Image (cartoon, rainbow, N blue to C red):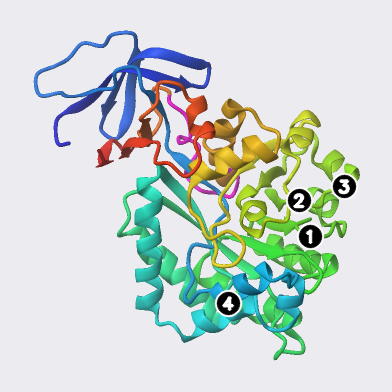
Amino acid sequence: MNAHATIIRGARVLTPGGAVLGDVRIEHGRIAAIAGTLPVAPGDAIVEASGRVLLPGFVDCHTHACWAGHRLDEWAGRLAGVPYLDILRAGGGIMATVRAVRDASLAELIAHLLDRLTRMLRGGTTTIEIKSGYGLTAAHELKMLHAIATAQSHWPGTIVPTALLGHAIDPDVPDFVDRTIRETLPAVSAEFPGITIDAYCERGAWSVEDCERLFVAAREAGHPVRVHADQFNSLGMTPAAVRLGAVSVDHLEASTDADISALGGATTFAVGLPLCGLHLADGRFADLRRASDAGARIAIATNHNPGSAPSGSMPLAIGAAVRWCGLSPREAIDAATRTPAALLAACGAETDNRGEIRPGAWADLVLLRHTDERALAYELGEDPVEAVWCGGVLVRG
């Protein structure tokens, strides 16, 4: 809409203090006012919400949405009972996508990514973190990061890039960890100074010691760090990450009492990725209820990737988090909006004005079909979104 202002009238507005029935005024890309009834100026555009829920745009703080190829054969193998770590050791899993990404051109990576981003935007995701990690060499990691950076100029939402340098171990490179720290990290640091560095700590991937070496080097070069940990095995990475000052520990399906205790009250965020358990059908989900009760700061994300979570739907992630991670619907909404916005801000992104509906916040908004926000978690596989705004611009409606 090109009017001077937009007024969303008569919505059930989810504010940080709770739900209120009223109007929201958008001016110059930001939320200008929230009140029971707002005056309408000549030229204002009016959107009648009729009591439907207005909430912040979803903030998907953990994705691998930049990739090429597919993993349908691997999925068929898992359906037949082949464990994922066995697939990884046989050269499948992440390495299959690595080969496809290396073969893809920069233009092809951008096109694939923009296609996924278009679908995610229609589902209400207005801010998204996107990792590299399927390149494993300096040249191919940089190719992915340039694809992610280019996509930002063609997408109305906000993209936060992450350099996932410690993803898989390339079996064709005997000194792979040393080479990543010695060559890939400096190359990425030179072109993307301050970008967050990530790693995947798991058997068959990066060890705790490998991650610590990467993170120490990254921190010395001025990079925040995040880590995938406790997906299949608790190896001690979670307390190590807290000690190292990592921004987040993501996955947590296999976390022990000691791991959860380490996260309690820490500045490190705990990120659950419930679509993994849903897709892998292994019944393994992060116990976010226990983590929250221990004092951890909780976020949820889709983990959108071709192997373990082939979905970019934040509404589906919210529904899964309520059913299997122990969150209430409102807790899950907060974990998909306000908390991940704070997490990405801790990575240096300009997202501290997202994830909330309050005066002065960036007007990334989602209007649901529903008049009760609990329906967002109650429905599965439906399209709950009526309209989406990015920076006050209507991008779906």
Kindly identify the residue that appears in the image at 36 percent across and 62 percent down: 114
| Residue type at tag 2 | Glu
Q: Do the residues under discs 2 and 1 have CB atoms within 8 angstroms?
A: yes
- Crowd rating for badge 3 (residues with CA inside 10 Å; few <14, some 14–19, many 20+): some
Query: What residue is shown with label 1?
Result: 232
Residue stretch in magenta: 346-357
Q: Name the residue under label 2.
A: 253
The quadrant holding residue 233 is bottom right
- Relative to 193, 95 lies left or right: right
State how far apart marks 3 and 4 are (Cα). 33 Å
User: What residue is shown with label 3?
Assistant: 256
The CA span between labels 1 and 3 is 12 Å
Secondary structure beneath dot 2 equals loop
Considering depth in this image, is 216 or 354 the residue closer to the camera?
A: 354
The amino acid pointed to by label 1 is Phe
- Of tags 3 and 4, the one toward the viewer is 4
Q: Which of 239 and 22 is in front in this view?
A: 22
Residue type at tag 3: Thr
Nearer to us in this view, 120 or 40: 120
Spot occupied by residue 236 in the image (x, y as percentages of width and height):
87, 56
The three-letter amino acid code for the residue at tag 4 is Asp
Q: Quadrant of the C terminus?
A: top left
